[in-house]
């Protein structure tokens, strides 16, 4: 038994540690229209939500991706492909 195991056994005498896990959280993204972190549907669009008292125009839209972020992502994917070809 490691020191960590002893600490965990002490903190969770009923053995619950590692038992229950939090439910998976829905994907979220920052809405460019209202600036808040909002949940996304399975289709990757914002659920209907409000901006102040009015419906937010970002409802039902896809999150905007900054062009620099998209370029970094593409570069990383290409680098990964090159590495795989060489291997
Ligand atoms: Zn919004």
Image (cartoon, rainbow, N blue to C red):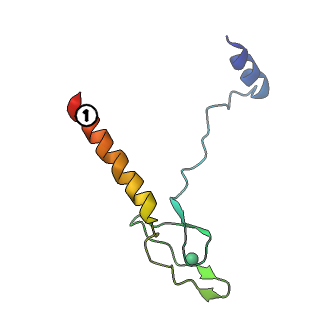
Quick check: which quadrant has ligand 1?
bottom right
- Disc 1 under 8 Å from ligand 1? The reply is no
State the residue in front, 71 or 63: 71
- Residue tagged by mark 1? 84
Image quarter hosting the N terminus? top right
Looking at the image, residue 60 lies above or below residue 17: below
Q: In the image, what residue occupies the spot 52% across and 78% down?
A: 48
Q: Quadrant of residue 13?
A: top right
Query: Which residue is outermost to the top?
Result: 1
Residue 57: image location, x then y, percent: 52, 84
Q: Secondary structure at mark 1?
A: helix
Looking at the image, residue 43 lies above or below residue 54: above
- Say whether residue 60 is left or right of residue 28: left
Residue 24: image location, x then y, percent: 54, 50
State the residue in front, 42 or 52: 52
Label 1 crowd (10 A; few <14 / some 14-19 / many >=20): few
State the residue in front, 6 or 46: 46
Image quarter hosting the C terminus? top left
Query: Which residue is outermost to the bottom?
Result: 54
Q: In the image, what residue occupies the spot 38% across and 57% down?
A: 71
Query: Which residue is outermost to the left?
Result: 85
Q: In the image, what residue occupies the spot 32% across and 41% down?
A: 79
Q: Tag count in the figure?
A: 1
Residue 82: image location, x then y, percent: 25, 38
Q: In the image, what residue occupies the spot 45% across and 58% down?
A: 69
Looking at the image, residue 3 lies above or below residue 56: above
- Say whether residue 57 is left or right of residue 83: right
Residue 9: image location, x then y, percent: 73, 22
Looking at the image, residue 82 lies above or below residue 87: below
């Amino acid at each position: 038994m490691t020191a960590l195991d002893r600490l965990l056994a002490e903190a969770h005498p009923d053995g619950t540690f590692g038992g229950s896990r939090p439910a998976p959280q829905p994907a979220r993204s920052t809405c460019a229209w209202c600036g808040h972190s909002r949940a996304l549907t399975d289709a990757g669009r914002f659920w209907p939500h409000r901006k102040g008292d009015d419906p937010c125009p970002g409802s039902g839209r896809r999150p905007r991706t900054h062009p620099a972020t998209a370029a970094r992502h593409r570069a990383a994917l290409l680098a990964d492909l090159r590495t795989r070809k060489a291997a």
